[in-house]
Image (cartoon, coloured by chain):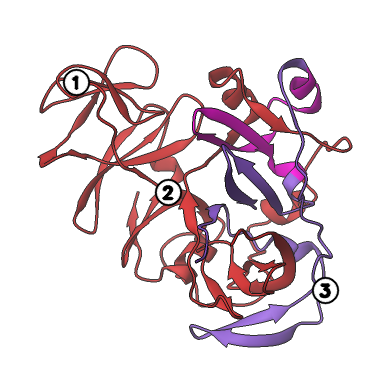
Chain colours: A red, B purple
Amino acid sequence: MTLTFIVSGKLWRNAMVMQDEETESLWSHLTGRALDGTLAEHQLELVPSVQTTWAAWVAEHPDTKLLRKEEAVTGSRYAAYFSDPERMGLFRTDWLQERMPGKARVHGITRGPHAVAVTDERLVHGTLLHITVGDDPVLVTRTADGGIRAYVARAGDTVLHFEPAAGSNTATDAATGSTWDLVLGVARSGPLEGTALEELVVQTAFWFAWSVFYPNTQVVD
Amino acid sequence: MMRRVLLLVLLATGVAAAQRPEPKVHGTFDGDEMYTVLPPDAIPAISDPQFVTGEEAAAQMAADEPVLGIVHEGQARAYSLWHLDAHEIVNDSIAGAPLAVTW
């Protein structure tokens, strides 16, 4: 069944709830899981995406398509909400206030029961951050298009440690010396040429939201 | 048999915060209430997405305009987040795979 979604007008944990037109089940857009209705407990597959600026994106992806605007849009209708550090959703939640400000942006990664939030400040351009999510070694990086991308840093049984290499979005791994494209997660040359890393979904969120969805999250800052 | 639907996820912003609701509790899930703040479809999702490229795209965008970007099946697509503020969901597809782009 292919589903078509509308905005339900409901909020759960201060985040948008979608409603599918086919069954009127209600879905959390952050987790992709149905909470209510005949499809309750079904899980949508999450697909990696990035948040960045238009200039950075189009410079790296000149053939990109853009969702056409039906009319001019010259700013965010929620600009005042985004910039006010005291406004955190509509409803009070038990977010983890002691750890960092609620409006701090984090880049969240989940794997099974494990969750990690990397602060935005930790991921300057070119950073090759090696972390562990659950049992898996994970590379987190900010590529030239401004996006945060994460990969399982393993090829077969070999754990990979990446170092910067000449060229944009390029790294070599210490174990084999292969050269990797960090946008695609694929080895371009060397012994592992053609090997693709498993890409993980990175979700950029305000801390007040992430820490309610994933109260056991680790923080990397 | 349910066909798998792809979802592109983003920021949990509580962006409906610009509206002042009369909240009603729809139910409680995993210990947290789900509130009804607007009627269904009050914020209209996009279900017939159209795309532009090149100069036509550039003319619609500011350099510092935030976008959601994806590279899927070799195709790059961008969605203005200022644009998505007014829609929150795009029912899109890439290479035959249904994809809900959400904000």
Q: Residues within 10 Å of mark 3 (few under 14, many from 20)?
A: few
Chain letter of disc 2 in the image: A
Give amino acid for label 1: Ser
Give amino acid for label 2: Val
Q: Which region is colored magenta?
A: B56-83
Give amino acid for label 3: Pro
Residue that appears at 58% across and 59% down: B12
Q: In which quarter of the image is the N terminus of chain A?
A: bottom right
Q: What element carries label 1?
A: loop
Residue that appears at 48% across and 76% down: A41
Query: What is the x, y in percent for residue A90?
Result: 69, 72
Alpha carbon separation for disc pair 2 and 3: 31 Å
Residue receiving disc 3: B39
Q: Which residue lies furthest to the top in this view?
A: A166
Residue receiving disc 2: A201
Alpha carbon separation for disc pair 1 and 2: 24 Å
- Confirm whether the magenta stretch covers residue A100: no
Chain letter of disc 1 in the image: A
Q: Is residue B26 above or below residue A174?
A: below
